[in-house]
Image (cartoon, helix red, strand yellow):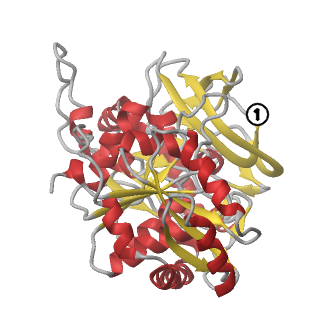
Amino acid sequence: MSVGSIPRLVIAAPSSGAGKTTVATGLMAAFAEAGLVVSPHKVGPDYIDPGYHSLATGRPGRNLDAYLCGPDRIAPLFLHGAAGADLALVEGVMGLFDGASGMGELSSTAHVAKLLRAPVVLVVDASSQSRSVAALVHGFASWDPEVRLAGVILNKVGSDRHEELLREAMDSSGVPVLGALRRDGRAGTPSRHLGLVPVAERRSDAVESVAELAARVREGCDLEALLALARTVPELPDAPWDPAAELAPAEGTAEGPAAPEKPLIAVAGGAAFTFSYAEHAELLAAAGAEVAPFDPLRDEHLPPGTQGLVIGGGFPEVYAPDLSANAPLRAEVAALAASGAPVSAECAGLLYLSRSLDGKPMCGVLPAEARMTERLTLGYREAVALRDNALAAAGTRVRGHEFHRTVLEPGAGADPAWGLTHPERRVEGFVAGGVHASYLHVHWAAEPSLAGRLVASAARSTPARGAAR
């Protein structure tokens, strides 16, 4: 089987809250437990659901975001992530046809399904309806003829009689019912201010939840019919995304001098820094770096020989006292930044580099104070690099995503990281020495030069004191 013909399904819903994550994660786990190699994917920028997908399948959860990465990269990124799998399952985002605000279908689940030529299975919250479910499904099935709505899974069904009424109604819709799941809170996943609690923060409980979801799906869904549907897909003509090819010099340009050894780039992880795209580490490695994960909650020192640092998103506000208590690591991060080594920080990383977070001392790299608020900042952004820095050349244009309930005062330094151009115009973030810190989450697969530039800068830097090889 070629990677282009890998069996695949998109799990969608009419709206948020219908149970997409429950069903998608349960299906992933059930098929994996049956012996299939399952490739998990998530539409949109969300970092948390892919953690549960990874737990269910044993493979990295990967995002497919047509706004952040562009429509032309969706199929190649999918094929890269799905290589070697027997089945790929793609969890949608929001309602089936909900895309980037004001941009039509762009980045919607329907848009991604069309780009992948994948059938859609609609998860419907049936808790407050019976015959009306058929009208709802008919509307979704007929809205866009290019979207192949090929099946329905009824969720939150109240009783045998309720299921009987729903199935009778669906008999006339022309869309087969491929599963019916009862209302059940036993496998619930806790939420807080930015959505589900990440797997890294509740791993043992999350393992139990995923196992329960798999059991519910096996009991309530027709796995054979779902797999048969997934195998009806046409061949995708695209070539898989290749991080090494993305970083190859353009034709007619000269390669820079080879580094004497691989620069070591430390990447923050653990419960406080769970937000990252799998392709980032792959791009860093393809650019010639040695990638070394570390946990700022547990490790008192940077990995030996660190010459560059990547601190992604997460929930530092939840762990501010513990991060603050790790004074030895905070001092090493500050020393590395002071040495001029490249430091790329997004959102949680930005807060960690500030003077303080909710009154707790942080690394003190940036002249700013951070605090939690009740206000959610959420949405896609377009931005441009205003000056050359360790991450981006001046004029580099990116698309990113903001998602936080914190504020930083001031919100930008004398040399801002980005000039936002859409949907509002403002400057944001900090550039100082080798530091690039911003609230903006950027998917490097859309702009691989970011990884290449960071690694090249790291190769020229000297390990900070206390991080010698």
Residue 18 image point, x, y percent: 65, 63
Instruction: Give the residue pinned by disc 1.
Output: 410
Q: Nearer the viewer, residue 156 or 62?
A: 156
Q: Is residue 426 left or right of residue 461?
A: right
Label 1 secondary element: loop
Q: Residue 61 at what x, y percent from top left?
A: 42, 59
Viewer-nearest residue: 202 or 462: 202
Residue at 50 percent of width and 27 percent of height: 398
- Quarter residue 87 falls in: bottom left
On the question of residue 214 being in view, the answer is yes
- The amino acid type, in three-letter code, at marker 1 is Pro
* Residue 307 x %, y %: 36, 45
Residue sticking out furthest to the top: 252
Residue under the image location 51 percent in, 34 percent down: 67
Say left or right for 421 vs 289.
right
Front-lying residue, 228 or 295: 228
